[in-house]
């Protein structure tokens, strides 16, 4: 799987797998990677991955610097970099290039046994350190650890025969990779001195007079994080959810996933598909909010050649693409009423009709819908068909907001830190940072937590994330889409409003290159009002003041 590795001042700080068809980078909260830099647009650039090649599409309207060239669209070659504020993000077609210290220390590779990657992938592991009668156990949290006499090693060995940086162990896709860091007395696997080896669990390594036992950790304790198809959490609500998913997945009944923005609805939809017998058939996502009213019918049902202007050839719709598989209708609450009727017909009869076609086609599709709206309220107000509501909500799955399952917060935060920190770096959250996370109310739910971790990894000064490295998404009012800042202490509402007004005007002036006619038009204020304001703020030019 390809990945994007972010560097700041030559230092790797963040790693993101390119696992989705579309990955959006930008400053805004709804991006897949949140980049805290005002030079980066709210939506800066999209990476479109088709399984072979990666294209970039600038979303800022100003161009994105790719391999030093400003582009609006183009292909992203292996090793090419994107300039994003103070960061450089390098695209690697094949993930897995590890930190330089490992790859340069190549001796000869002893392949002991290739363990089944899948079997050990999520297995918790530990190292038991045995020195004579003394024994201590260290649970493996990061992707790798170093061992040696030096205090900077993750595992400090009190052994006179150990070198200061003796060895490094990396876990990659469930495989444990041991590299001897040119130690004086060697790393031993039984009678064999190893320089680099892939080892299964359990394995006993000998360093000087010390035995390092790499082994599976004790079975998950109750507090241990569960991972169900990428859904992390051990809160009772999450466990119930996992059970429910397993129960409903095998049938072909429609499921609707309900929950606030960022609670993991898409993740749940994917888990349902993955647990179903349709798992080896496609899952086709359609975002009903992102497609224009004119195009959505043809997106869903396809069209015949020449059925409307612009329909040059015939095209399959999402229903046909998903035949035998699952259709994920995201933001179902935004589907226009006339299409709701057509969707209902498709669900009831298992038949669809392409736009412009005279005959219907039979399809076998399981629909999973998602929304953060109250569909029943929408039905009462006549914006959502009640019959469709009952048809879709045969099985409703309610996802809890993060603020009501704070017991999972630490585990989720650590999961994101582990997922996004560069390989070989054991980044951790300080207790103060964890405490600060607990205090936040999480209006943006798990997506916000992911963003907070992204930003902290990008901004951190070292291997720890402290409370001061955390910055939260601004709260956005759902109805108006306006972010609401908090009133700073000691400031009155009036002072705040004036400050905001001035900021809005100044930003508009900048955007319009100082053209005040345009600013007045854009902001919908009379020119005289704008001029008066600018004068009050001392923002008029010298000659106009006289
Ligand atoms: N339980 C979880 N464990 C791990 N990651 C999660 C979990 N829930 C959500 N996420 C992650 O949080 C992010 C947002 O989740 P997702 O896109 O599924 O939210 P959503 O409910 O569809 O939000 P929206 O309504 O805004 O579309 C994703 O990166 C997802 O992988
Ligand atoms: Mg979603």
Image: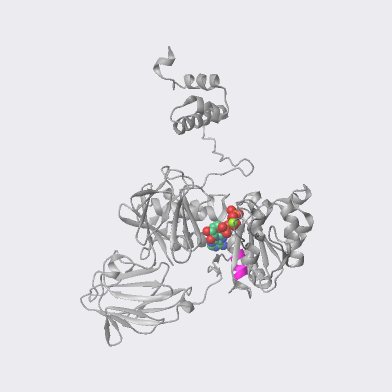
Q: Quadrant of ligand 1?
A: bottom right
| Nearest to the observer: residue 58 or residue 131 | 58
Which residues make up the magenta segment?
268-273
Q: Is residue 469 above or below residue 284?
A: above
x, y percent for residue 483: 56, 41
**Quadrant including the N terminus:** bottom left
Q: Is residue 491 above or below residue 235?
A: above
Nearer to us in this view, 104 or 181: 104
* Rendering coords of residue 102 (x, y %): 29, 69
The answer to whether 133 is drawn above or below residue 303 in the figure is: below
Q: Quadrant of residue 251?
A: bottom right
Of all residues shown, which one is farthest toward the bottom?
Answer: 191
Query: Is residue 269 a member of the stretch shown in magenta?
Result: yes
Residue 292 visible here: yes
- Secondary structure mostly taken by the magenta-highlighted segment of the chain: helix
Q: Position of residue 81 (x, y in %)?
A: 36, 55
The residue depicted at 75 percent of the width and 60 percent of the height is 344
**Viewer can see residue 132:** no
- Quadrant assignment, res 346: bottom right
* Residue at image location 52% in from the left, 31% down from the top: 500
């Amino acid at each position: 799987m390809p990945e994007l590795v972010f560097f700041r001042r030559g230092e790797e700080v963040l790693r993101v797998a390119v696992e989705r068809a579309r990955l959006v980078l930008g400053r805004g909260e709804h991006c897949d990677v949140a980049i805290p830099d005002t030079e980066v647009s709210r939506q800066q650039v999209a990476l479109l991955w088709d399984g072979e090649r990666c294209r970039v599409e600038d979303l800022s309207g100003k161009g994105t610097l790719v391999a030093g060239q400003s582009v609006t669209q183009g292909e992203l070659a292996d090793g090419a970099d994107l300039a994003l504020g103070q960061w450089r993000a390098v695209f690697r077609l094949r993930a897995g290039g590890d930190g330089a210290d490992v790859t340069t220390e190549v001796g000869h590779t002893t392949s002991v046994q290739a363990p089944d990657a899948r079997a050990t992938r999520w297995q918790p592991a530990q190292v038991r350190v045995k020195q004579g009668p003394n024994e201590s156990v260290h649970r493996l949290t990061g992707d790798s650890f170093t061992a040696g006499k030096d205090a900077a090693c993750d595992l400090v060995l009190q052994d006179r025969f150990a070198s200061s940086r003796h060895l490094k162990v990396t876990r990659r896709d469930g495989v444990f990779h041991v590299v001897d860091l040119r130690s004086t007395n060697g790393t031993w696997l039984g009678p064999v001195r190893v320089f680099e080896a892939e080892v299964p669990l359990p394995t006993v390594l000998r360093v000087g007079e010390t035995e390092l036992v790499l082994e599976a950790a004790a079975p998950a304790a109750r507090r241990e994080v569960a991972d169900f198809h990428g859904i992390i959490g051990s809160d009772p609500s999450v466990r119930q959810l996992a059970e429910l998913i397993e129960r409903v997945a095998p049938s072909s009944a429609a499921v609707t996933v309900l929950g606030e923005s960022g609670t993991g609805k898409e993740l749940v939809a994917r888990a349902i598909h993955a647990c179903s017998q349709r798992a080896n058939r496609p899952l086709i996502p359609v975002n009903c909010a992102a497609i224009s009213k004119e195009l959505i019918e043809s997106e869903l049902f396809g069209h015949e050649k020449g059925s409307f202007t612009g329909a040059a050839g015939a095209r399959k719709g999402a229903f046909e693409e998903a035949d035998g598989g699952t259709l994920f209708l995201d933001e179902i609450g935004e589907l226009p009423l006339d299409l709701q009727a057509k969707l209902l017909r498709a669900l009831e009869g298992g038949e669809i009709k392409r736009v412009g076609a005279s005959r219907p086609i039979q399809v076998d599709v399981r629909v999973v819908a998602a929304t953060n709206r109250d569909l029943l309220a929408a039905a009462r107000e006549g914006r959502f068909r009640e019959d469709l509501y009952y048809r879709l909500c045969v099985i409703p799955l309610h996802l809890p907001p993060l603020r009501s399952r704070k017991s999972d917060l630490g585990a989720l935060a650590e999961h994101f830190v582990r997922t996004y920190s560069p390989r070989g770096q054991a980044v951790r959250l300080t207790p103060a940072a964890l405490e600060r996370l607990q205090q936040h109310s999480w209006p943006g739910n798990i997506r916000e937590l992911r963003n907070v971790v992204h930003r902290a990894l990008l901004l951190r000064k070292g291997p720890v994330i402290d409370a001061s490295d955390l910055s939260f998404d601004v709260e956005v009012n759902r109805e108006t889409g306006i972010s609401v800042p908090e009133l700073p202490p000691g400031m009155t509402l009036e002072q705040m409003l004036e400050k905001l007004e001035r900021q809005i005007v100044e930003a508009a002036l900048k955007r319009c290159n100082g053209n005040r006619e345009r600013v007045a038009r854009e902001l919908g204020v009379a020119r005289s009002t704008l001029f008066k304001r600018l004068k009050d703020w001392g923002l008029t030019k010298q000659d106009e003041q006289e």
